[in-house]
Image (tube, coloured by chain):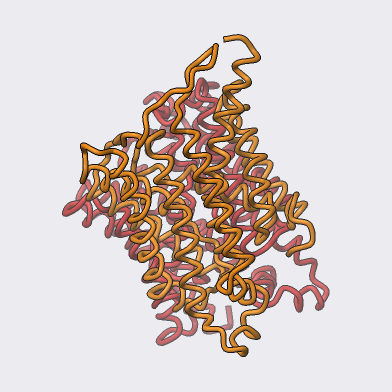
Chain colours: A red, B orange
Amino acid sequence: MNDPNMRRALLFHLGVVLLLFVLQFVLPAYHHTNFARIMVLACYAIGYNILVGYTGLMSLGHAMFFAAGLYGAGLTIHYFGLPAPVGFMLGILAGTGLAIAVGLVALRTSGVSFMIVTMMIAQACYLATLYFGSVTRGDEGIVLRPEARRGIFFSLPFDLSNPAIRFNLALILFAVCIFGALALVRSEFGRVLVAVRENEERTRLLGYDTNRYKLLALAASGAMAGAAGAMYVLLFSYFGSTFASIEYSILPLLWVLLGGAGTVVGPFVGTLLMFYIAEFSSEYTSAYKLVVGVVLVLLVLFFPKGIAGSLRERYAPWLP
Amino acid sequence: MSFGPKLFLALMEGTVSAFVLALTALGLSIVFGVMRVVNVAHGEFFMLGAVLAWAFSSLIPDMPAAGFALALAGSPIIVGAIAVSADRLVLRRLNYGPEATIVATIGLLYIIQQIVLMTYGPDARPVQPPINFRIVFPWFGYSGYKLVVVAASAVLLAATWFVMMCTRLGLVMRATQFDRETAQAFGIPVDRVYSLTFALGAALACIAGVLIVPIQQAHYLMGLDPLLLSFIVVIVGGLGSLRGTVVAAFVIGISEGVISVFFSATLAKIIATLFVALVLIFRPAGLFGGKRS
């Protein structure tokens, strides 16, 4: 706390969360829902960034962890009638468990091989959601029954279709993720992750078990993706195979690159911007994917550090 | 149909798809081998081939054979030109960094796919086969055109083999693959070799697309399956090994054909993708690749 940079970083992120809290009272209904969605998706991106931005491991299959959270929560709530909070915990558990399982085998590879291995495993997961269509209803998906989203949490009744509850739950998850990420990257653990990104050989030489660190980073990343997926299904009630498809593995990559890989606030900035770019472009053309493609190419060509990364370089070296 | 003829049909279908797959995967393999670039947009070059084949053949609707010949000659040139400009405008500026090029080719995939959707539309459109005869077996009739596909693919595979192994161009490409800097020091225009390699890889996928389109209709999303299958083939065959790629294409193409006749196609794909992930993890040099890294 004595470190002025640390204090500034804390205040900055606290400011972002406060600003979002205040925004719910001024936003019109349509954008209100959008922001809830953006905050949940930003948690997915923050988790992805821990892996790609801080540990230097680029996964092309993160949709499987998001989908694990989505299905882990959605299926148990839909079929076993579990209360929503229990389903949420199961979703996080599913995301984390899958991440550890995948990590145990996939982390034997690195670089391009790691990208392809994760993509292949995620593709197998996606196909599995189609194959077990009698349970998951495949592409068509499942919509949670309204009564499944109502309940009592510590003697407080709640209804997840209420916009205010929805917004604030998304905000709570977002705050937990962003401060979790902040604490993580500022901790000794986070510094080792950055060391792995910069030079794995040397880190190993210094006596760190880099494989264990990479596995833990993947687990943390999977936990956040799972939490985002579980929250998504609770708040927006729909889940289907699309969320497991390769497109949902590319999106967090896009958000993180746009916002700035290796910054805590970057994934949120990227998600917010891309969401509204897609929103505006779809008013004029149907070329949502064209925009995604062009932005991706322009980013890697001219802007590899992303928005928050470039800001940090020029104006705010304290930004974590 | 009883078991024997059904297996026979499955084997024939598998052979056809194996040849087309070998052609597509060979393009991906050459690009990866020489340039060390994982081209995620490779499937879109395949799709462009199919869509361009439709465009060319609809220019001459009365003569399917002439239209098809035109497509076979014209499409690879157009797709090759697109590939060269993608190389010059994007990949070269990224210095062919492995992760940056993957992200850039993902972008390219979306751009090509969406432009085709906006111009060609969301419909699947058929193309007349250039020849019309059926081979009649005692149990079923079989489209003769599929044999043309097999023959044309075989010729092209052999031609690519010849170019890579027996011509000066192939020598220069292999030299660049072996050691880029030394090749440059010996006066090989590495930049031009890279552009040509990328164009050659794209053209192979494009021709595969042209050949397949009379069997399978042209659609803007048709690139994903050949892309994933090509990845599988290139990895199982050993990254950068052309011989391994062709062998793996036959093993996987034929077994996929057989499995999907007898079991669910989705299950076959799940097994194949998991299998390839395991190969990449435990045998990174591929199953047939041998020594080549």
Which residue does the image show at 54% across and 44% down from the upper left? B21
Q: Nearer the viewer, residue A239 or A301?
A: A301
Image vertical order of residue A122 relative to residue A191, above or below: above
As drawn, is A150 to the left or to the right of A113? left
Q: Residue at x 29, y 38 (%)?
A: B64
Residue B45 in picture, x, y percent from top left: 41, 54
Quadrant of the image occupied by residue B97: bottom right
Pick whichever, A60 or B66, lies toward us: B66
Relative to A314, residue A297 above or below: above
Using the rendered view, name the quadrant where residue A214 is placed. bottom right
Q: Horizontal placement of B256 versus A71: left or right?
A: right
Image x and y of residue B158, in percent: 58, 53
Between residue A20 and residue A236, name the one nearer to us. A236
Residue B169 coordinates in the image, percent (x, y): 55, 72
Query: Percent from the top left, x then y, of residue B249?
Result: 62, 44
Residue furthest to the left:
A284
Image quadrant of residue B188? bottom right
**Direction from residue B61 to residue A310 in the image, left or right:** right
Residue at figure coordinates x 51%, y 56% from the top left:
A176
Residue B153: tell me if it is visible.
yes
Identity of the residue drawn at 48% across and 85% down: A317
Which quadrant is the C terminus of chain B positioned in? bottom right
Query: In the drawing, does residue B255 fall left or right of residue A26?
Result: right
